[in-house]
Image (cartoon, rainbow, N blue to C red):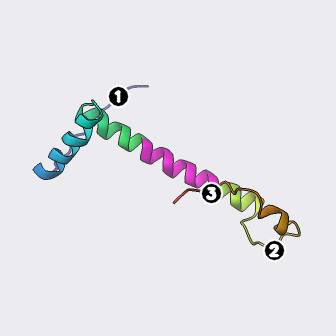
Amino acid sequence: MGTSVLSLRIDHELLERLRHQAAKRGMSVQDYVVRTLIRDDFDQRFQAAVEETERFYGSPGSGDADQDQDQDQVRPSAGIR
């Protein structure tokens, strides 16, 4: 897998906040931004997978005969915003 360059123009205040957050984690601004983007991308892909799973198996309250039994189980989307 190769790498590419992405150039951004951001205001000074945002850059200072990014520097502060990166420094708290002992990271460079570049590493902090890349990790944030990777985490956000993962969250979006995970949410899409959860939604697909719920469509496949049915969402909570869909009228299944086992609905009472399902209420005791944790749904895949538990804790996802």
Front residue of 63/73: it is: 73
Disc 3 secondary structure class:
loop
Disc 2 secondary structure class:
loop
Number of marks: 3
Q: Is residue 3 visible?
A: yes
At 18% from the left and 51% from the top, the residue drawn is 14
On the image, numbered disc 2 is attached to which residue? 63
Dot in front, 1 or 3: 3
Percent position (x, y) of residue 13?
Answer: 13, 52
Front residue of 6/54: it is: 54
Disc 1 secondary structure class:
loop
CA separation in Å, label 3 and label 2:
18 Å
Q: On the rendered image, what quadrant is the N terminus found in? A: top left
On the image, numbered disc 3 is attached to which residue? 77
Among the two numbered marks 1 and 3 on one chain, the one whose residue lies closer to the N terminus = 1
Among the two numbered marks 3 and 2 on one chain, the one whose residue lies closer to the N terminus = 2
Left or right, 60 with reference to 3: right
Residue type indicated by callout 1: Thr
Percent position (x, y) of residue 81?
Answer: 51, 60
On the image, numbered disc 1 is attached to which residue? 3
Dot in front, 1 or 2: 2
Q: Residue furthest left?
A: 12
At 70% from the left and 62% from the top, the residue drawn is 55
Residue type indicated by callout 2: Gly
Q: Which residues are magenta?
A: 39-51
Residue type indicated by callout 3: Ser
Front residue of 32/4: it is: 32
At 27% from the left and 31% from the top, the residue drawn is 27
Left or right, 54 with reference to 79: right
